[in-house]
Structure formats: C-alpha cells, structure tokens
Image (tube, rainbow, N blue to C red):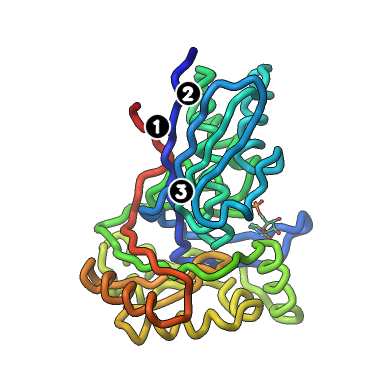
Amino acid sequence: MTAPVTVRVPAKVNVQLAVGAARPDGFHDLANVFLAVGLYDEVTATPSDTLRITAEGHDVDQIPLDRTNLAARAAELLAARHGIEPNVHLHIAKDIPVAGGMAGGSADAAGALLACDALWSTGTSRDELITLCAELGSDVPFSLVGGAALGRGRGELLTPLPVGGTFHWVFAVADGGLSTPAVYREFDRLTADTHIPAPEASPALLTALESGDPIALAASLTNDLQPAALSLRPSLAATLAAGTAAGALTALVSGSGPTTAFLVKDPESARQVAEALETSGTCRSARVAASPAPGAMLLQP
Ligand code: C5P
C-alpha cells in the first residue's frame, strides 16, 4: 500500500488589492499583490476506495465535506486530466481561518493537487499544476507558489515579486466568515455610478516589499474591498481601531475579510498587539505570523 502524503500550504494576505470594474464574466480585473504568511493548513492524501474528505480544526463544521469542497474538486480535476479514478482520502488539518479572507479554501485545493500528484505519481509538471490551480479558483495558483507575487487578470496570472526581509503580522480572527462573492457584490453596489480606474500595482508598495522596510510597507497597504467588507460587517472598524491603538503600524481587512491584518515592526510588537486584541473583545482570537512564507510543500514522512 502506498504511504500517505502530507502537503503544508500557507495562508495569504493581500498587501494591495486594487479592484477594477466587473467584467462580462462576473469576475473583476485585479492588481492583487499577494504575500504568503506563516499560518498553514495541512492536507494528507491516503489511498482509498472512493473520494472522501475529512477535516479537523476550528470551524470545520462550516466547510463542506462532499465533492463541492475545493480540495475534492482538485483531486477530481487532476484524476480526470490523467484518466484515472479520484480515489483518495483527503484529510485537512485547518489552521487558516475558515472563510476569513486568507485563502484557506484555495490553500486546501493547492495542497490536495500536490498531494494527489505525489500519491498517484502523475508526474504533472509545475506549469500544468499552476494551470489546474487557475481552473479551481483565482487565488489557488498563489497558494501553490507562495512567497510574494502580483496577480493580474482575476488574480491568477502571477508574476513573482522580490521581498527584502521578514514582515511581522498579527491577524484578528472574527466570529463567522464572509462570502467572497457577497463582498464583491457589495463592492459593485458601493461603486455603482462611479468611474473605476483600471487596477495597477503601486510602485511605492513594490519598492517597500523589496526593501523589507515595514514602515514603508505600512504606508502603502491598500485594499479596495475594505469598504465593502466594513459595510457588510461594521464591527470590523472596532477591531481595526483596537489593533492600531495597541501599536500596529497599520491595519487593514485581509482580502474579502472578515479577518483583519495588522502590520507590526517586530516580533515583540506582534506579541503586544496580539495580546491587546485578544483582550479587546473585538475579535475571537489573534494570531501572530511572519511573511513571506513558502508555497505548498510536501512534508517528509
Ligand atoms: O475565483 P474564485 O472562485 O475564488 O472566486 C470566488 C468569487 O469571488 C467569484 O465567483 C466572484 O464572485 C468573486 N471574484 C471576483 N473577481 C475576482 C475574483 C473573485 O469577482 N477577480
């Protein structure tokens, strides 16, 4: 019997999320600067008679365990590409907040793809894996590659970016998730009748990433989905204020939310801000993590 395969996959934060107008296909053109952060899900693939998903961790009762799970769809897509049956047991150990705007579902899909590729010895090339990731979702290619990257198109067309140092973050986990399509719909509602410029990566932000200087990065973080996330979840304003009052360099909603991200100057500051957020009553919990983090990776048994 083939040995189980485990893949570790990072969460992401968007240090710039510039959103353009809705396209005819319903997606939005983006200039999406992804940064992988050191919070990880682990996906373990074990031989099985059928496709089966199990999960452990916070809020896993909120993720589907049937074939609508993005990890199951990843296994089916890879199997179909190679003309084999998608017979695998995928176990997902979740540490990335569920429906939190940190690409947890995308991470599980990228992890499942890499784990099944190894389990089934499909020998799929890196380029083909990235193409399959893009079929699964806009953020899935970045979960595979990690590091830092500019995502164009709907976020799936990646250009790797240089990062000149380690950035320290605190993430405030909210009670309950937010639906990404609902946040984009709210963006459309809030921006109706306004001119939306074509999204462009900010040169100042790219320079700040390359310099590794957290103060410069803090000055250039932006998220065009933040007003929409705040409109749907007004209580996030208090979380953002609590982290800033506790000494964060800056605060923003992570992706489509409701996780909020706080950039801090060093690990000591991260501990202080996390403690203040934990006791502020404005979030469920606070997590400390550093970036950049590597992409999806096979763990040695
Ligand atoms: O690509 P993914 O399946 O992750 O996207 C989820 C939803 O988020 C889409 O159905 C769409 O409503 C919205 N979305 C968007 N524009 C993007 C990415 C996602 O409108 N660039």
Residue at 38% over, 63% down: 206
Q: Nearer the viewer, mark 3 or mark 1?
A: 1
* Camera-side residue of 30 and 265: 265
Q: Amino acid at mark 1?
A: Leu
Q: In the rendered image of this protein, does residue 286 appear above or below residue 46?
A: below
Residue at the top extreme of this rendering: 1
Going from the N terminus, do you reach mark 3 or mark 1 first?
Answer: 3
Percent x, y for residue 256? 58, 66
Determine whether 2 is above or below 166 in the image. Answer: above
Is residue 10 placed above or below 244 in the rendered structure? above
Q: Are marks 1 and 2 in contact (CB under 8 Å)?
A: yes
Amino acid at dot 3: Thr
Q: Tag 2: residue type?
A: Ala
Q: Earlier in the sequence, mark 3 or mark 2?
A: 2
- Where disc 2 sits, the SS reads helix
Please state the quadrant of the image where ligand 1 appears.
bottom right
Q: Label for residue 169?
A: none
Tell whether 81 sits left or right of 111. Answer: right
Q: Name which quarter of the figure residue 297 lies in.
A: top left
Q: Name the residue beneath numbered marker 1.
A: 298
In the drawing, does residue 20 fall left or right of residue 292?
Answer: right
3 and 2 marks in contact (CB < 8 Å): no
* Disc 3/disc 1 C-alpha distance (Å): 23 Å
* Residue annotated with mark 3: 159
Front-most of 80 and 152? 80
**Disc on the earlier residue, 1 or 2:** 2
| Residue matched to label 2 | 118
